Amino acid sequence: MGFTISEKILRDKAQSEEKNVVAGDFILAKVDKCLANDITAPIAIEVFKEVIQGTERGVFDPEKIILTPDHFTPNKDVDSANQCKILREFAHKFKIVHYFEQGRVGIEHCLIPEQGLVVPGDLFIGADSHTCTYGALGAFSTGVGSTDLGVAMATQLCWFKIPHTIKFIYSGKLNNWVSGKDLILYTIGKIGVDGATYKAMEFSGEVINTLSMANRLTMCNMAIEAGGKNGIIEPDRITENYLKQRNIKTYKNYVNDADAEYEDDIEIDCKEIEPQVAFPHLPENTKPISEVDAKKIEIDQVVIGSCTNGRLEDLEITAKILKDKKIHSKVRCIIIPGTQQIYLDAMEKGFIRTFLESGAIVSTPTCGPCLGGHMGILGDGEKALSTTNRNFLGRMGHINSEIYLSNPAVAAASAIKGYITSPEYFKNK
Amino acid sequence: MTYVIEGNVIKYEERNINTDLIIPARYLNKSDAHHLAAHCMEDLDPKFHEKKKELNASILVAGANFGSGSSREQAPVALKAAGIKCIIAPSYARIFFRNSINIALPLIEFSEIDELHTADKLQIDLEGGSLVNNTTGKNYSIPKMPQFLQELLAEEGLINFGKKMLHQ
C-alpha cells in the first residue's frame, strides 16, 4: 500500500516502535523545528519551565527553536511589551539562535521561508494556526497550541493523528488577475470552512506545477481556513530554485507513492475562476468579482500585506496598479511588507515611493491589523477589504465592522475607486 | 481527572464559533487565565457570564466546527477558567481540539445537539461512554475517546505527559 507525502513524512518522524502507522493512527513524532510568537510563546515558555523543573535540561536544540515577536509589535502597549520581554529573556537564557528582535523580525510565515529556516521534508510545528504555510516547500507543517510547543521545546516530541489526504487538482489556465489567493478562496468557497477538518490538503495539477513559490505559500497558508491540518505541495523545480537562491543543499524530498491512497480527489477547472471576494463573516462566502463589482460596496479601509499576501510579488502587483494613481479620498490604504528584506526590495524597486505618492500608509512588518491588534483597527460599522486570511466577525476591530477578503490586485484597484472592484479597469492604464 | 461530569447546560447553537469570538485578540496581550476568563465569549454574547451564573452552567453545548480559526490556546484556557468543565458539539476545529485535550478540558463529539437545551441538567460518563439528560430523561451513547487521548486526559493534560517523557 502506498502513502501520500504527508503520511510519509509523519511515518518517518514517528518514534521507532511506531513505524507501521497509517492515516488515522496517533503517533508521537520528533519535530524538526518549533515556532512561537509574542502571543503564544509566553504560555509555551511557562509550560516549558514546568516540564523541565527539577532537571538540568534546557531546550532540545537551541538552533531548532524560532521565536518571532510579530503580532503586537512594535510593542503596542505595556502588556505587549511585557509579553515580548518574556520571549527576549527566554531566548537569552537558553541561547535560542533564531530569536528575531524587533527590527529584524518580520511576519513569521513570510520570514521563515525567506530565511531558509524551513526545508522540504521538515516536520514543523508552530504555535500559530497559519504554520500550515510551509507545506508549499514540501514540509509537513502545522499549527499547534502553546502547551504542545512548550512540551516540544523540552522533549522534541509532539503528538499527531496522521491525517487522511484530500488531493486538489487544478487544471486549465489562470484567467487575468487570478492568483494563488483566488485559487484557495475558490476552493474554500467550494468545500466550506470545515470542508477539510483534520485532513491534509494536497495541491497539485498543471496549474500548481507552474505556480510561483509566493503563490504556493499563499495557498498553503489558507489550508487552515478550510479546517485543514496542513497544506502541502510536492517539491519540484520551483522548490529547488527557491532553495538554491538561499544556498540550501541539505534536505530530503518526499514524494507521493504512485499507489498512494487519497480520501478524495477534487478537480478544479481554473477556467471557471475569476478573482474572488470573500464576504463577511467567513472565508467560504466567496463570490467572483464580476458579481461583486455592480454592488459598489464602499470601503473605509484596505489592508495589503499579512502572512497570506505580504510578499514581494504581492507588493509588485499592488505597485503596478497604484502607480501614478491616488487612493480614494475616503479610503485608508495600509500596505505592510512582510519582512525587512521585502521592505528593502520594495524600496529598491520603487514600490514604496509609489505607495507613498498614492496616499497609502506603509507600515513596518507586523501582523497588527489582521487580528485587530493595532495599526489599523476598524470603527463601528466600517468596512475593510483585506488581503489577509480571516474575515470573522469583529476580527479587525468593532463588532459591527465588516471584512471582505481578496487578492492584492483587487484590493489595490478598490482602494483607488473607493468600492470593491475588478483590477480589469486598470488593465491598459 | 474525573470521568463523570454533572452540570447544567449553556448553549450556543451557531456553527463555526471561532476563537476570535471565544477570546478576542485584543485581550491576548496578557496571558493570565483570570483576565482571559473575564472576557470569554464577549463578542459572541456580552451576557455570557451573567447567563452562566444564573444557570449555574458548567457544560457548554455548541454548533459544529467549534473553535475554528486561530491556534490560541487562550480560547480553551479562558473557557476552563470561566468554569466550563466540558464542551459538547458535533465537531471541533483541530487545533482547538488538541489544545483542549492538552489542558485536560474534555470535548465530546455529539451530533444531536438539538436534544440538549440551555438549563438542561446533564450527566456524562466519559469512560462508560454515556450521556444522560436528566431534564428530558433521555439517554445517549457518546463515542469513547481514542486510547491515546484518554491517556492524556488521565495525566491531567500534556504537561505531565511531557514530564514523564523527559524523565524516561
Image (tube, helix red, strand yellow):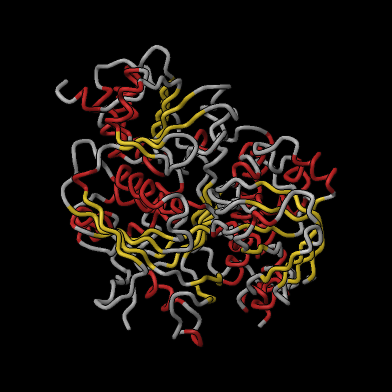
Q: Which residue shows up at 51% across the image and 27% down it?
A: A376
Q: Is residue A48 visible?
A: no
Q: Is residue A394 visible?
A: yes
Looking at the picture, tell me which residue is in the foreground, A63 or A139: A139
Vertical placement of residue A388 versus B87, above or below: above
Q: In this view, which residue lies farthest toward the bottom? A: A17
Quadrant assignment, res A295: top left
Looking at the picture, tell me which residue is in the foreground, A242 or B12: B12
Across and down, in percent, residue A326 comes to: 31, 15
Position of the N terminus of chain A, as image quadrant, is bottom left
Looking at the picture, tell me which residue is in the foreground, A125 or B124: B124
With A262 as the anchor, is B14 left or right in this view? right
Q: Which residue shows up at 51% across the image and 75% down it?
A: A29
Q: Which residue shows up at 58% across the image and 65% down it?
A: A153
Vertical placement of residue A230 versus A353, above or below: below
Q: In this view, which residue lies farthest toward the top? A: A329
With A251 as the anchor, is B63 left or right in this view? right
Q: Which residue shows up at 76% across the image and 53% down it?
A: B9
With A205 as the anchor, is A359 left or right in this view? right
